[in-house]
């Protein structure tokens, strides 16, 4: 019997919180809620959640700050819920470690669909990484990087760097296909999948996050290169 997924709802608007809870519970999820950004970290220390539904405009601590604070500690999907629709706000949230976003006012059915999509994708990536694949090498060496495929670890000059699941899968895919150029659309299809509700611009944000961790100078990347008008290439 499958374990019931548990969702943490971080939302200070009581009406929206009630709608999110009602629809997610009707879809078979367990939910817990907090209304203040300062309460999230302690909540996560006490309970294991499968996904975080995170409002950006919160009292105490903004959703941006919450996302940045917990991203390295908790590797589960973070779905931002925001009244802001500008692209820069979305990119900022994704750049801090969120996996997806949905703008208010939202269709509750779409919200549930986004939650399902993020959980399915996370499970697909983690189960694929956990399973042994004879076609995959145990280690990949790219310049001063060592990627340990089965243990999901990455080292730069012998020092471990932390990559959440999608960043790791994206880096691993490029490392297994070095010196090849892939478009944003190709990478989105490969890592996020056909059934994922999202935007291929998400790839750019994840590429930038990876660069900040693996490059000596992320503004002048030598490992993960942009091929203008074509896509991205990992140089061996």
Image (cartoon, rainbow, N blue to C red):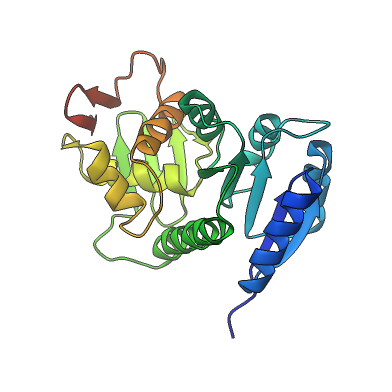
What residue is rendered at 82% in x and 40% in y? Answer: 36
Does 213 sit above or below residue 7? above
What residue is rendered at 56% in x and 56% in y? Answer: 111
Residue 72 in view of the camera: no
Number of numbered discs visible in the structure rendering: 0
Does 234 sit above or below residue 187? above
| Residue 161, x across and y down, in percent | 51, 35
Does 133 sit above or below residue 161? below
What residue is rendered at 78% in x and 44% in y? Answer: 13
Does 169 sit above or below residue 29? above
Query: In front: 24, or 226?
Result: 24
Q: In this view, does 98 lie to the left or right of 28?
A: left
Quarter where residue 231 is shown: top left
| Residue 130, x across and y down, in percent | 45, 64
| Residue 220, x across and y down, in percent | 34, 13
Query: In front: 79, or 13?
Result: 13
| Residue 95, x across and y down, in percent | 51, 30
Q: In this view, does 80 lie to the left or right of 166?
A: right
- The quadrant of the picture occupied by the C terminus is top left
Farthest bottom residue in view: 1
- The quadrant of the picture occupied by the N terminus is bottom right
Query: In front: 180, or 77?
Result: 77
């Amino acid at each position: 019997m499958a374990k019931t997924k548990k969702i943490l709802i971080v939302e200070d608007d009581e009406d929206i919180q009630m709608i999110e809870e009602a629809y997610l519970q009707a879809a078979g999820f367990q939910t817990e809620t907090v209304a203040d950004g300062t309460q999230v970290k302690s909540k996560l220390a006490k309970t294991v959640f499968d996904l975080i539904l995170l409002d950006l405009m919160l009292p105490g601590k903004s959703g941006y700050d919450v996302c940045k604070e917990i991203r390295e500690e908790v590797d589960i999907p973070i779905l931002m819920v925001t009244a802001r629709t500008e692209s820069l706000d979305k990119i900022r949230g994704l750049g801090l470690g969120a996996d997806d976003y949905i703008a208010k006012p939202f269709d509750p059915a779409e919200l549930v669909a986004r939650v399902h999509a993020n959980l399915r994708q996370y499970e697909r990536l983690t189960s694929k990484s956990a399973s042994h694949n004879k076609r995959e090498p145990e280690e990949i060496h790219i310049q001063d990087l060592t990627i340990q495929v089965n243990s999901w670890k990455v080292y730069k000059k012998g020092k471990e760097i932390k990559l959440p699941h999608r960043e790791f899968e994206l880096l691993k895919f490029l490392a297994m296909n070095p010196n090849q150029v892939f478009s944003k659309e190709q990478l989105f299809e490969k890592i996020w999948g056909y059934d994922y509700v999202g935007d291929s611009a998400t790839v750019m944000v994840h590429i930038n996050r990876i660069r900040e961790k693996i490059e000596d100078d992320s503004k002048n990347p030598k490992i993960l290169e942009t091929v203008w008008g074509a896509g991205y290439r990992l140089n061996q």
